[in-house]
Image: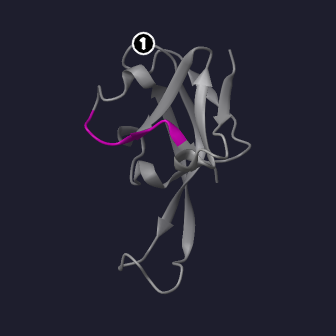
Amino acid sequence: MDVVARHAHPRADAVRGCVALTRGPLVYCVEQADVVGHSVEDVRVAPDAAFEVLPGLAPSGLPAVRTQASAVVVDVAEPYPAQAPAERRAPVKLTAVPYADWGNRAPGPMRVWVPVA
């Protein structure tokens, strides 16, 4: 089965511009435990991302999914600056586990809907 990046409906405001990764009946999520050095909130998937299936990597023994992504890095001290802060992108190897497996390794946030770069 292929990994499919399913796009959110453009009227779904909370997830506009995001994709959810699926493979057959499985829905995947990205956990903070797999995003080393960055926040899971800063991760972006490339629109033309290629996916690799990793058999037996998830805690349940189900396949995980890996892809190359990027993390948005913003260096700004104040919460509401007068000018938009400059952004740069850092490459991130992104691993997604089946949604049913999240929360089994370390406490932290997770995302099902990941923004597209």
Position of the N terminus, as image quadrant, is: top right
Q: In the displayed image of the protein, which residue is found farthest to the bottom?
A: 82
- Residue nearer the viewer, 75 or 114: 114
Q: Which residues lie in the magenta part? A: 106-113
Look at the image and name its color scheme: one colour
Q: Who's the residue at 62% across and 28% down the image? A: 52
> Residue 117 location in percent, x, y?
64, 54
Extreme front residue here?
11
Image location of residue 66, percent across then percent down = 56, 33
Query: Which residue: 35% across, 39% down?
Result: 33
In magenta stretch: residue 107? yes
Q: Nearer the viewer, residue 47 or 13?
A: 13
Q: Position of residue 17 (x, y in %)?
A: 63, 49
Q: Secondary structure at mark 1?
A: loop
Q: Which amino acid does the dot numbered 1 rest on?
A: Gly
> What secondary structure is the stretch in magenta mostly built from?
loop
Question: Residue 94 in magenta?
Answer: no
Q: Which residue is mark 1?
A: 61
Image point (48%, 65%), residue name: 73
